[in-house]
Image (cartoon, rainbow, N blue to C red):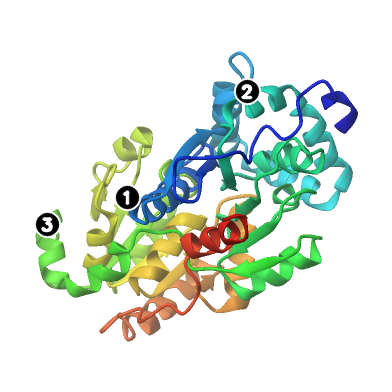
Amino acid sequence: MVDDWTEVTLGRTGGASNAPDGRIVVVSADIGAGHDAAAAELERRLTDQGRQVDRLNFLSLLPGPLDVTVRESYRGMLRWLPWCYDALFSATGRSPASVQLLRAALRPVFRRMLARLPPDTRAVVTTFPFANQILGPMRVAGLVNAPLVTYVTDFAVHPTWIAPGVDLYCVVHELSRQQAIAGGSAPVRVVRPLVNARFAASAQLSAQAARRQFGLPEQGRLALIVAGSWGMGDVARTATEVLATGCVEPVVVCGRNQRLYRRLRRFPGHVLGWVDDMPTLMRAADVVVENAGGLTCQEALASGRPTITYRPIAGHGRANADLLSRSALTSYIDSAQRLRPALTELLAAAEGGDPGADARIDMAGVVADVLTPMR
């Protein structure tokens, strides 16, 4: 691939800047909400430090209508053909050749990527794995002189995250770090999740006040069922089974999935569509039931809510669930029969769910460390 790039001027990035430490480019993708949400949170933290940040949507670089095609194909597989997505996820996880094939398929993107990196770029941070398959080789070829840092949005580190040329990988758990190293990435640091600080700060709000904001009953036990921005997975079945335990009232968040929202209109629990204030809603709940989406699980853990992983979605959802189970961060429940005992046990731990101080390094601090040698 490097030979194909010899006509491009080397060292396009890494020049002078008017910003204190140069411009930082954060590359994400608007596929689901997790990648973009992490990028937005990093941008907020960096701009609070007075740094200049550009956000770049990787899918916007794809030629023609491919950005929509990729997004909707992914959504369609998750919704209608989860077995197909699971098989594809597993195949790319086992075969290094499949990742190399992906890298080759993305070759048409490299010129557009290079054109979108300003000359004064001093660091590039990715929150989307496919971006590494372009930026990593570009860095190896000398087309990008700025350090390349990756924040892995999932707990499980799939091989598509790993590419030559990435200077530093950042993950949110020690088991994730071990998995990344075993997969060939180094160095790897464990960092604080890129979720809004309001999830931890929401512990200062009473559960009753939080419930009033959403019109939820102030008495009784509530289980918040979340399934990401797209409302993917066996959400209706999960809600029915949680209700059947008799020990909690379900509060179901359908996200932007209008079909799911209409399907659950007559559900005897509490059904919500898109929610702008998830920190407050999580404070209203006694326990969170999630299906191993990286963002929603990290938000639940940051809020201090006892969390159950149940009926995980295909592919990365099941991979995340496996790592979460081994880490004991959540209770991974694999059958409806175990749901009531697990909820009963976790409800006893729901009082005083203050997550406490997080000793992991802040991601913005990691970027500052990367910039320091360049001053």
Report the Cα–Cα distance between label 1 and label 3: 15 Å
Question: What SS does tag 1 mark?
Answer: strand
Q: Residues within 10 Å of mark 3 (few under 14, many from 20)?
A: few
90 sits to left or right of 169:
right
- Residue 194 shows which numbered tag? none
Q: Residues within 10 Å of mark 1 (few under 14, many from 20)?
A: many
Pointer 2: what residue? 62
- Looking at this view, name the residue that lies furthest to the top: 64
Question: What SS does tag 2 mark?
Answer: loop
- Residue 253 shows which numbered tag? 1
Report the Cα–Cα distance between label 2 and label 3: 41 Å
Q: Nearer the viewer, mark 2 or mark 3?
A: 2
Q: Looking at the picture, does residue 349 appear above or below residue 324? A: below
Give the quadrant of the N terminus.
top right
- Residue 30 in sight here: no
Q: Looking at the picture, does residue 60 appear above or below residue 311? A: above
The image shows residue 350 at horizontal and vertical percentages of 30, 80
Looking at numbered disc 1 in the image, what kind of residue is underneath it? Val
Pointer 3: what residue? 213
78 sits to left or right of 196:
right
At a point 15% along the width and 64% down the height, the residue shown is: 210
At a point 76% along the width and 31% down the height, the residue shown is: 10
Looking at numbered disc 2 in the image, what kind of residue is underneath it? Leu
Q: Nearer the viewer, mark 2 or mark 1?
A: 2
Front-most of 100 and 282? 100
Quadrant position of residue 318: bottom right
Report the Cα–Cα distance between label 2 and label 1: 32 Å
The image shows residue 62 at horizontal and vertical percentages of 63, 23
The image shows residue 285 at horizontal and vertical percentages of 26, 67
- Residue 165 in sight here: yes
